[in-house]
Amino acid sequence: MSITSATLRTLTLATGLIAGLAAAAVAAPVQLTPADPQPSGLKPGLSVRYAYPSDVKSLGAARNALKYKVEQGAPLKGLDYRDTELGENVLTSKRAERVVADIRGYVRFDAPGVYTIDFLTNDGLHAVVGGQLVGEFDGRQACEETFAVEVEVPQAGWYPLQALWFQRTNTACLHMRAAPAGKRPTWMPNAAFGH
């Protein structure tokens, strides 16, 4: 059976269309689920519990550390913690190194739409907003970006936020950034968080 040039063009177009649809499906924004009911009377910032393991190199080790001795920490003002100096305590914890944080609360989006979210983290992070994974890095690194994720915010309001974060040694940072799709993400203001 011979393939005519018209058949070849049709196959090429069909293959391109399928590839384009697959790429669009992969790139489609993940839909966040708002808190239901919407919370009222929230305190500013985010709730945090700390564990202080003898060592931590992965998210798995961080999760395990939270099964043992855990301490409630002072609330985080938000998620804009710049790179620390050597020896400086991280977030609101009592230590500068080998710290695990279980962070919970809500983040507010003032308008519906598609947003790009990313984080800067040193070291590991697993962040879920509105039921969707929006930031992850499992390992150790300097203060660097996670992969950006496009999310669809169906309505203005509060969205549940849970994050597992760890810092092993030296310096640490944790930032959440967001912006409407097509714009460069910028720091989320502290006022966008509540618990």
Image (cartoon, helix red, strand yellow):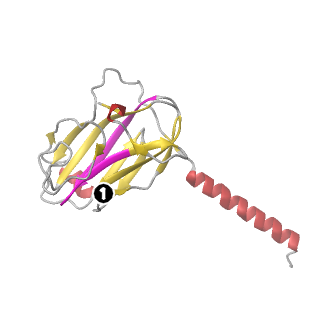
Residue 106: x %, y % from top left:
35, 33
Residue drawn at the location 15% of the way across and 57% of the way down: 86
> The residue tagged with tag 1: helix, strand or loop?
loop
Would residue 1 appear left or right of 58 to someone viewing this image?
right
Residue drawn at the location 48% of the way across and 29% of the way down: 156
Q: Which residues are magenta?
A: 157-176
Quadrant placement of the N terminus: bottom right
Residue drawn at the location 66% of the way across and 61% of the way down: 19
Would residue 151 appear left or right of 53 to someone viewing this image?
right
| Front residue of 1 and 14 | 14
Find out whether residue 46 is within the magenta segment: no
Q: In terms of secondary structure, what is the magenta stretch mainly? A: strand
In the picture of the structure, the residue carrying the numbered disc 1 is 143
Find out whether residue 175 is within the magenta segment: yes
Quarter holding residue 12 = bottom right
Residue 51: x %, y % from top left:
16, 48
